Amino acid sequence: MVNLSSLAPKTTVDRTPMPSAVRNSLQEIARSIEWSEGEFSLILAHCNSYYLREKAVRELRQLCHVPIREIVLNRSVEFLYATLQEEVKRKPTQAVEIRGFEAVPELDRLLMMTNFVFGEFYQNFHFPLVWWVDDATVRKLIRLAPDLYSRTTIIELTANRESAAVA
């Protein structure tokens, strides 16, 4: 039997304070989740830095009073709606965050199919949904899933909000 924990890279706890702009964005996400409790909403947490995203995910759980269920997409996911529906049936939830879009090889197809059935999300999921996305995923959403994209709340997570506005 292989001990998977021995294969994982050794990490240390990052104790550096969260930049205030990022903390403000996380508070905005937490408020959006809390205000949307019991109804569907889609929040895009837009963050390009893997390390900042990992730290932000941990901090969001501390800031938000609503328990957030995490789903990390595996590379073989084909239908986001079906994946989410299966997960929620197994264990009902008050809020869900989804990470791993950038690792899905068939992301274009996944986003187009999600756009096609997006009305089902509103009808069947009565909780806020947070997608952690990077620039490439946002560009694909705009191009391939415009209906879905138009119904999102986008919250930027960057250490410098001015640089995000310029980019």
Image (spheres, helix red, strand yellow):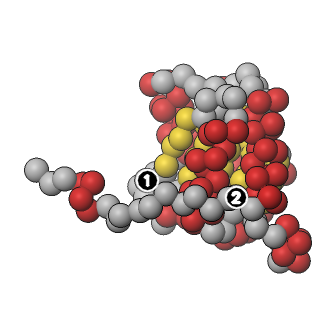
Label 2 sits on a secondary structure element that is loop
Q: Position of residue 46 (x, y in %)?
A: 72, 59
Q: Position of residue 43 (x, y in %)?
A: 75, 46
Label 1 sits on a secondary structure element that is loop
Amino acid marked by disc 1: Asn
Furthest-left residue in view?
1
Residue at figure coordinates x 62%, y 39% from the top left: 61
Q: Decide if residue 21 is in sight here.
A: yes
Q: Decide if residue 114 is in sight here.
A: no
| CA separation in Å, label 1 and label 2 | 28 Å
Residue 80 occupies quadrant: top right
Left or right of residue 134: residue 82: left
User: Mark 2 highlights which residue?
Assistant: 18
Left or right of residue 79: residue 150: right
Within 10 Å of the Cα at label 2, are there few (<14), some (14-19), or many (20+) other Cα atoms?
some
User: Mark 1 highlights which residue?
Assistant: 74
Amino acid marked by disc 2: Met
Within 10 Å of the Cα at label 1, are there few (<14), some (14-19), or many (20+) other Cα atoms?
few
Residue 53 occupies quadrant: bottom right
Residue at figure coordinates x 74%, y 25% from the top left: 37
Q: Is residue 136 above or below residue 152?
A: below
Q: Position of residue 32 (x, y in %)?
A: 80, 37
